[in-house]
């Protein structure tokens, strides 16, 4: 899963609030981004990322490396589901092999 880390990047650049980020975006890019949009990006509340919004935030913060605003997050729930599936498959295989021998 890809996670937005705009809050962390903003704090690193000395921008400590969403309001300050909104003001910085307006000052640096001339774009008046909606507070709700900034909040969604800041809090990683989006399943889809608007590239223009991400670019605007990166431009305002002076970021050129996507690694500063995106992070690959390992989702342990998917891993556990996968391991359970493997375990069940192994049990079925053992049962099937035992059944075929008899």
Image (tube, helix red, strand yellow):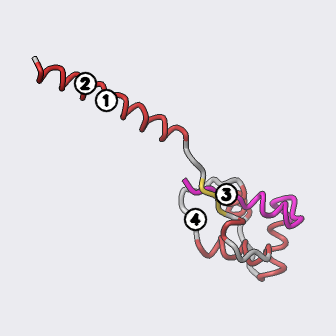
Residue 41 on image: x %, y %:
68, 60
**Contact check, label 2 and label 3, Cβ < 8 Å:** no
> At numbered mark 3, what does the secondary structure look like: helix, strand or loop?
helix
Residue range corresponding to the magenta coloring: 1-20
First in sequence: mark 2 or mark 3? 3
- Left or right: where does residue 39 sit relative to residue 22? left
**Contact check, label 2 and label 1, Cβ < 8 Å:** yes
First in sequence: mark 1 or mark 4? 4
Which residue is denoted by mark 2 in the rendering? 94
Q: Quadrant of residue 72?
A: bottom right
Q: Residues within 10 Å of mark 4 (few under 14, many from 20)?
A: few
First in sequence: mark 3 or mark 1? 3
Q: Residues within 10 Å of mark 1 (few under 14, many from 20)?
A: few
Q: Compared with residue 37, is residue 78 higher up or lower down, i.e. above or below? A: above
C-alpha span from label 3 to label 1: 42 Å
Which residue is denoted by mark 1 in the rendering? 90
C-alpha span from label 4 to label 3: 10 Å
Which residue is denoted by mark 4 in the rendering? 49
Residue 19 falls within the magenta-colored stretch:
yes
First in sequence: mark 4 or mark 2? 4
Q: Residues within 10 Å of mark 2 (few under 14, many from 20)?
A: few
């Amino acid at each position: 899963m890809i996670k937005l880390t705009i809050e962390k990047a903003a704090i690193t650049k000395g921008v400590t609030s969403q309001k300050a980020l909104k003001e910085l975006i307006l000052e640096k890019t001339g774009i008046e981004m909606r507070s709700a949009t900034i909040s969604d990006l800041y809090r990683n509340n989006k399943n889809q990322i608007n590239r223009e919004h991400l670019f605007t935030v990166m431009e305002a913060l002076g970021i050129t490396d996507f690694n500063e605003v995106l992070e690959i997050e390992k989702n342990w729930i998917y891993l556990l589901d996968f391991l359970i599936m493997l375990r069940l498959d192994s049990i079925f295989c053992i049962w099937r092999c035992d059944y075929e021998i008899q």
